[in-house]
């Protein structure tokens, strides 16, 4: 349950940040290319932090060798 709450909070923070940057770009406070860059790097940072906090150092993919070994163990 904590993990879902943490992930939802991160999504809410990301959405709020993007809305604020969108308002600033439409109002002309910051140029569009700065706002888009800030949004991209901000979202990337939030995703990276959330992945590190929730999953630690677990890789999101496995090597072909690990895949074959896992499939072999499933069939046994």
Image: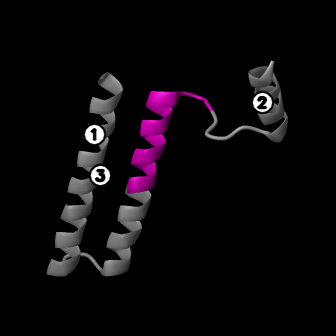
54 over 22 or under it: above or below: above
33 sits left or right of 22 in the view = right
Q: Quadrant of the C terminus?
A: top right
Across and down, in percent, residue 25 comes to 23, 76
34 over 65 or under it: above or below: below
Q: Quadrant of the N terminus?
A: top left
Question: Earlier along the polypeptide chain: callout 3 or callout 1?
Answer: 1
Across and down, in percent, residue 36 comes to 37, 71
Residue 65 quadrant:
top right
Q: Which residues are magenta?
A: 43-58
Residue at left offset 20%, top offset 54%: 16
Give the residue number, with chain letter if any, for mark 2.
71
Across and down, in percent, residue 12 comes to 23, 47
Helix, strand or loop under label 2: helix
Number of numbered discs = 3
Question: Earlier along the polypeptide chain: callout 2 or callout 1?
Answer: 1
Label 3: few (<14), some or many (≥20) within 10 Å?
some
Distance from the alpha carbon under mark 2 to that under mark 1: 33 Å
Label 1: few (<14), some or many (≥20) within 10 Å?
few
Residue at left offset 43%, top offset 59%: 41
Q: From the image, state whether disc 3 or disc 2 is nearer to you.
A: 2
56 sits left or right of 10 in the view = right
36 over 13 or under it: above or below: below
Tell which residue pokes out farthest to the top in this image: 76
Q: Considering the whole magenta stretch, tell me its main secondary structure.
A: helix
Tell which residue pokes out farthest to the front in this image: 75
């Amino acid at each position: 349950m904590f993990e879902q709450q943490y992930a939802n909070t991160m999504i809410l923070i990301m959405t709020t940040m993007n809305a604020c940057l969108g308002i600033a770009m439409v109002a002309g406070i910051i140029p569009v290319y700065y706002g888009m860059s800030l949004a991209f790097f901000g979202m990337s940072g939030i995703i990276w932090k959330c992945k590190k906090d929730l999953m630690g150092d677990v890789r999101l993919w496995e090597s072909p060798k690990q895949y074959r070994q896992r499939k072999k163990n499933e069939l046994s």
